[in-house]
Image (cartoon, grey):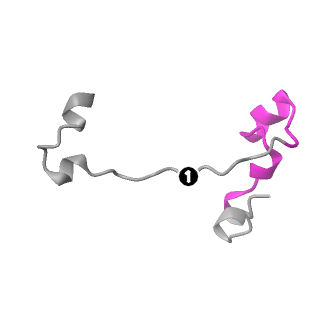
Amino acid sequence: MNYNECTDMTMPDTVRTSVGYAYVPIQMLGRVYTPEKALERGTIFPELDISISEYERGLYDGK
């Protein structure tokens, strides 16, 4: 499907309906890991470096 087909107002509503909207809050760049540590941990941001069990228990507060 190309742009002209997506904006064609004769198409059924089910085709022209938006799927969703993304919301990305403004983030401040704070501390970061060294490149070596980031590769080891899988993220450059220490704030995102939590275990899956911490995330599942709701301990991640985004700070």
- Classify residue 14 as left or right of residue 19: left
Would you say residue 1 is visible in this rendering?
A: no
| Local crowd size for mark 1, using a 10 Å CA cut-off: few (<14), some (14–19), many (≥20) | few
Quadrant location of the C terminus in the rendered image:
bottom right
Relative placement, left or right, of 35 versus 11 is right
Residue 56 visible, this orientation: yes
The quarter of the picture where residue 7 lies is top left
Image height check: is 23 above or below 39? below
**Three-letter code for the amino acid on which mark 1 is drawn:** Tyr
- The verdict on residue 3 being magenta is no
Q: Quadrant of residue 40?
A: top right
* Nearer to us in this view, 55 or 30: 30
Q: Horizontal placement of 50 versus 24: left or right?
A: right
The residue depicted at 72 percent of the width and 57 percent of the height is: 51
Taking the view exactly as shown, the residue that stands out farthest to the front is 9
Which quadrant, please, contains the N terminus?
top left
Magenta stretch holds residue 45: yes
Residue at 23 percent across and 47 percent down: it is 16
Tell how many labels: 1
Q: Looking at the image, is 13 positioned above or below residue 4?
A: below
Residue ID at (79%, 35%): 38
Corner quadrant of residue 28: top right
Q: Which residues are magenta?
A: 30-52
Q: Position of residue 34 (x, y in %)?
A: 87, 31
Choose between 49 and 10: the one closer to the eye: 10
* Residue shown at the point (76%, 32%) measured from the top left: 39
User: Which residue is labeled 1 in the image?
Assistant: 23
Q: Residue furthest bottom?
A: 57
Mark 1 lies on a secondary structure that is loop
Question: Quick check: 17 above or below 6?
Answer: below
Q: Is residue 9 above or below residue 21?
A: above
